[in-house]
Image (cartoon, helix red, strand yellow):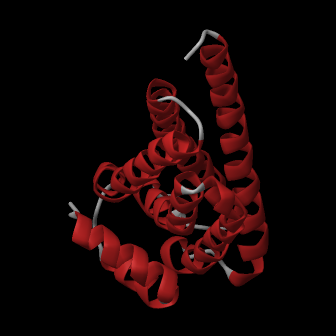
Amino acid sequence: MMNLNSVFNRARNIIVNPKTEWLVIQSETFNKKAIIKGYAVPLIIIMSVCSVLGSVIMESNVAFAIIKAIGIFGFTYAGIYVSAVIINELTTSFNSKKDLDTTFRLVVYSFTAYFIMSAIAFLWPPLSMLSVFGLFSIYLFWEGTTILLDTPEDNKVGFVVVSAVVIVGVFTMLFLILSKILLTIFSLGF
């Protein structure tokens, strides 16, 4: 189980020195529940709080901002979970190790750059163009695949591309649903 200091240190280390941090992660035995609860949830909460603050600062009323943040939390959590399960099922097609807990580690820790950049973009929407730096998560995923899943070098490009398509597809679908829900709520007068 991680505390906020551990979350901060892991986030810093995975961004600054991913190869070394993936080796540390490889030696850990956290299961998917512990990784989500101890690492992903705190970062998703930070994103959600930044969303509330940014929405209130920029234009929205508090009730709508809170509803939006709850949606962001729920759909981000679901997106990570669904993406990891699908990617785990694809591992054997790329001669990679199939292990759901390990795949969750890869997906969750790879999302670090996305979490940080989304929090910044939500907090101050004029900086939303900086969210493109969240694409660093693809590089983090790239570095982690061989270390965690033993993905052979000749399958690495295909695995990372297919995984990225899965993640983008899952998140696009979920956030389109969230947008529809928020538009409906907003049209009701929130």
Q: Position of residue 173 (x, y in %)?
A: 71, 34
Question: Which residue is found at the position 60% from the left and 16% from the top?
Answer: 185
| Depicted 102 relative to depicted 152: above or below | above
Q: In this rendering, does residue 182 appear at all?
A: yes
Question: Which residue is found at the position 23% from the left and 71% from the top?
Answer: 5
Q: Position of residue 165 (x, y in %)?
A: 76, 53
Determine whether, in the image, residue 9 is placed left or right of residue 177. left
Determine whether, in the image, residue 44 is placed left or right of residue 85. left
* Quadrant (top left/top right/bottom left/bottom right) for the C terminus: top right
Choose between 144 and 13: the one closer to the eye.
13
Question: Which residue is found at the position 47% from the left and 59% from the top?
Answer: 108
Determine whether, in the image, residue 188 is placed left or right of residue 29. right
Q: Position of residue 35 (x, y in %)?
A: 34, 57
Q: Quadrant of residue 163?
A: bottom right
| Depicted 20 relative to depicted 181: above or below | below
| Depicted 190 relative to depicted 80: above or below | above
